Image: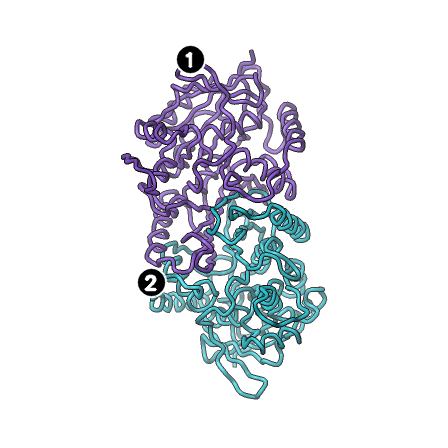
Chain colours: A cyan, B purple
Amino acid sequence: MTTHQDVPARSAPGTPSEREQQVLDRIERARRRRAKVKEERITLAHGSGGKATQTLIEAIFLEAFRNPLLEPLEDAAELTMNGTRLALTTDSFVVSPLFFPGGNIGDLAINGTVNDLAVSGATPRFLTAGFILEEGFPVADLTRIVDSMRAAAEAAGVSVVTGDTKVVQRGKADGCYINTAGVGLIEYPGTLGVATARPGDAVLVSGPIGEHGVTVLLARGELDIEADLVSDTAPVHGLVAELLASTSGVRAMRDATRGGVATILNEVARAADVAVVVDEDAVPVGTEVRGASELLGIDPLYVACEGRIVVIVDGAEADTALAALRRHPLGEQAAVIGRIKEDPPGLVLLNTVFGGTRICDLLVGDPLPRIC
Amino acid sequence: MTTHQDVPARSAPGTPSEREQQVLDRIERARRRRAKVKEERITLAHGSGGKATQTLIEAIFLEAFRNPLLEPLEDAAELTMNGTRLALTTDSFVVSPLFFPGGNIGDLAINGTVNDLAVSGATPRFLTAGFILEEGFPVADLTRIVDSMRAAAEAAGVSVVTGDTKVVQRGKADGCYINTAGVGLIEYPGTLGVATARPGDAVLVSGPIGEHGVTVLLARGELDIEADLVSDTAPVHGLVAELLASTSGVRAMRDATRGGVATILNEVARAADVAVVVDEDAVPVGTEVRGASELLGIDPLYVACEGRIVVIVDGAEADTALAALRRHPLGEQAAVIGRIKEDPPGLVLLNTVFGGTRICDLLVGDPLPRIC
């Protein structure tokens, strides 16, 4: 069995180690083989974060824009400009409804981009904001959304420095869509990325999962389910700083948004060509989320969070990392939920509470459209 | 009369001269006085780039996000990160139809952001791309759009390094909306910005105006007008580089998109508290645009271009700047169209071809929605 001691030293930023290069090559070959969009028309599944999204991204976007900065398909791209290491990221937000318990599209748009920068090891600094508004949208709602953005930006220590507003005719949008892009400063000396996960590593989550997704779903009011739930939307930059300061063993972090924790773990398994083995009963899930999920027939592992991170860390550093997460208010219920193993490469296995093991694959459809 | 010799030396980046500070203070007071959105609901005019857009931006966005980087409301914000000067910008594209003679939403989305970086004096480098797709959108159309983005990015020397895809239900978008954000490197030593325009400066445009807007309008097929027109969509970074290399007298550049040249000139007049006096017969307008505009009852000065820039330059350097623009293929028909004067401050005056003078104000409504 490979332990953390056997693993070669981390390579300098930008120059992959031999193992990393082998992994990258293998992914590349797999991509070229698999990626082809079979559908003639875009479906909601193409926006789910699951299999269809991945195929769309690889077959169309990656194929066209192919470059070494885009290729890792991480949450943020790492740029070096005049010797300064920067992270750049973008996200569009189309959540429905626009307002839900615990937040609205505005703070979601700020936190989402702040979090993509934070999990890439960057200190979030500057954001852009692009609004697409539907004719007839109440100005009072826009003001409320923008006020939430201001508060979220203040809480995360970022400035919105440039923006854009477009208006489309009635029936050509759904009230308000927001895009944010963000730039952060990378001062962390190591290389982070899901492709660097290796056997022996531990898998952690920073708190109970699925709260954002279930909250939004219930806020639509179409289901006759009541639950005392609020979205977990929050900026994770402080939590990440606490973690990175405690150990140099962090391989990768991701915020578990669209597609939930299971989707992130599949990306790890695939990018690093390793197995991810998760103990179902170690995964923190709140009572309300568990209850609502059972009624709805969905698996919390696939439900979006907006303030939770998945961490892959050197197995020997798991306890240190867990303690660091738990020291932060957002990480009080953090848990080690699994391990990275060698076999079967590319798969996520779930040891279920009933004692069985099942494959936890990428979703094919989209049970929860427009959750973020 | 103030001439260029009387003007104090340009101040260092970031520290406004006394005159600049006075101007900024005056604008600030004016903003606080004026900006209030009177409408209860968003109208198409809020997206026109005219008066309603300006009020919306000042009353809601600027009010909430207020910070020194956002405040100048230039096309891109200037950031300094670890001593590196960067420009950051964003734009959403909602053009209808998605495909039009000379381009489509894809190259428009690349060129638009490349141009916002270029006119801020930055070398465009890295772009993000966020897609909002409507369920049912043809994958073949998406592929064609993304291919155009690839070609436009190559032509402009930029890389798309990160992206995002969302899908919304049928009837909740109009096929495809794209947001791009961009980062560029500022190496130009001076301070550019419309607030630095001063009496004696010359006003140039880099080519015939209004071609993009009229092309898109006719491509909708609702009007019984035929014209042999193509959009002027193009990346202006090469043109800008040629200009900046030829003279240090450039005060400001803007790409004349939504709202056209007239809107840019109003921003100059307002930001610098000067008069902009334009000779109507000096403004280059192609025969097809002139003819179509007359039939449609619109003024080409307010019609969007996507590959034309407005330049404010020290009056003594006007000929040098004009020659530099004309040396570049995109600037062959560049022209000096007016001058900056002291009075009446804040206004754009047009010396008409009939020998009269009229005020050329910001538009109140939006005669051309969704042109970009």
Residue B338 vs A101, above or below: the answer is above
* Residue that label 1 marks: B355
Dot 1: chain letter = B
User: In the image, residue A314 lies at what x, y percent?
Assistant: 58, 71
Name the chain letter of the residue that bears numbered label 2.
A
The Cα–Cα distance between marks 2 and 1, rounded to whole angstroms, is: 59 Å
In terms of image quadrants, where is residue B156?
top left
Q: Label 2 neighbourhood size at 10 Å, few (<14), some (14-19), many (20+)?
A: few
Looking at the image, which residue sits at the far top? B1
The quarter of the picture where residue A226 lies is bottom right
Quarter of the image where the N terminus of chain B is located? top right
* Disc sitting over residue A218 in the figure: none
Q: Residue A40 carries which label?
A: 2
Q: Is residue B153 visible to the viewer in this orientation of the structure?
A: no
Q: Quick one: SS at disc 1? A: loop
**Residue A290 vs residue B97: left or right?**
right
User: What residue type is disc 2 on?
Assistant: Glu
What type is the residue that disc 1 sits on? Gly
Answer with the quarter of the image where residue A96 lies. Answer: bottom right
SS of the residue at dot 2?
loop
Q: Where is residue B306 in the image (x, y as percent from the top left)?
A: 40, 37
